Amino acid sequence: MAALLVPIHLFLHGIAAPLGWVSINPSLFGHPLVKLYLFVLISLPLYHWAHRFRYTLYDLGVKGMRQPIAVLCYGIAVVGTIVTLWILWRV
Amino acid sequence: MTAARPDRPKVFQPKMPANWWLKHPKYFLFMMRELSSVFIAIFLVVFLIQIAQLLRGPAAYSAFVQKLGAPEWIIFHIVAFLFALYHSVTWFEAAAKIVVIRRGEHRVPPEAVAGAGFTAWGVVSLVILVFVLLLRS
């Protein structure tokens, strides 16, 4: 998911839009299907990140606090998902 | 296992230095791959905050997009974009090694699987690009 979708969105929203190459109509974000898509785009990679980051910490030698690190990483992903849901619901 | 394991202190436990990944180009690239997901996560959070600005009104949204035009943010996004490209390329290459499709006695070559992945990536990106450009009004 992240590999397929993120690069083009990074380019569009991070580079092309701020530089004025394209203009993205914000009312697009109000459409239910768009919101669903954005939810998938934003919250799913968070879990991917959580898993990767946790194991990267282990790779870097941080082995002492296995449980808290796991809770922290996946916890952030869960919180991120809830926040995303809440924001998209209200937009 | 019939032989008892020696006590812990007698077992050889090599200590891995924390900078193991600096010792070899391939290890470094591996760590860069892991770092790429951090940049991608940061971008997604920034994007989410951008969308959240709509909850504060169109003025807040425009102000935020203006801020994104600042050089530091553009540079961040360019760096994140390069990391995302690296992430995707290595992803499809890794997937090609893992996905084994057999046709009779032959295995579909990994290059074909990778090629399919890259093609799908290109098509999806193009579709999104066209979609966003067409829906400008």
Image: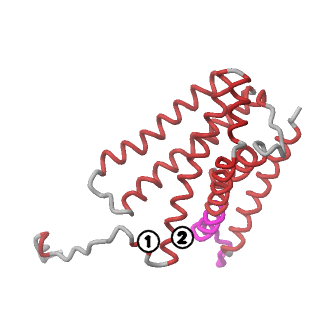
Q: Which residues are magenta?
A: B88-108
Picture coordinates of residue B44 (x, y %)? Answer: 61, 43
Task: For label 1, count other residues whose C-alpha is less than 10 Å away and answer few (under 14), some (14-19) or many (20+).
Answer: some
Q: Identity of the amino acid at label 1?
A: Trp
Q: Is residue B2 left or right of residue B25?
A: left
Picture coordinates of residue A67 (x, y %)? Answer: 30, 47
Label 1, on which residue? B21
**Res A42 quadrant in image:** top right
Which residue of the protein is positioned furthest toward the front in this rendering?
B71
**Res B33 quadrant in image:** bottom right
Q: Which mark is residue B29?
A: 2
Q: Nearer the viewer, residue A3 or B82?
A: B82
Residue at the location (66% across, 51% down)? B77
Q: Nearer the viewer, residue B59 or B14?
A: B59
Q: Look at the picture and state if B23 lies above or below A21.
A: below
Q: Is B77 colored magenta in this rendering?
A: no
Quadrant in the picture for the C terminus of chain A = top right
Which colouring convention does the figure follow? secondary structure
CA distance for labels 2 and 1 = 9 Å
Q: Are marks 2 and 1 on the same chain?
A: yes
Picture coordinates of residue B50 (x, y %)? Answer: 66, 34
Residue at the location (67% across, 37% down)? A38
Q: Identity of the amino acid at label 2?
A: Leu
Residue at the location (73% across, 64% down)? B116
Q: Is residue B19 left or right of residue B85?
A: left
Q: Look at the picture and state if A36 lies above or below A67.
A: above
Task: For label 2, count other residues whose C-alpha is less than 10 Å away and answer few (under 14), some (14-19) or many (20+).
Answer: some
Picture coordinates of residue A39 (x, y %)? Answer: 63, 35
Q: Nearer the viewer, residue A86 or B70?
A: B70
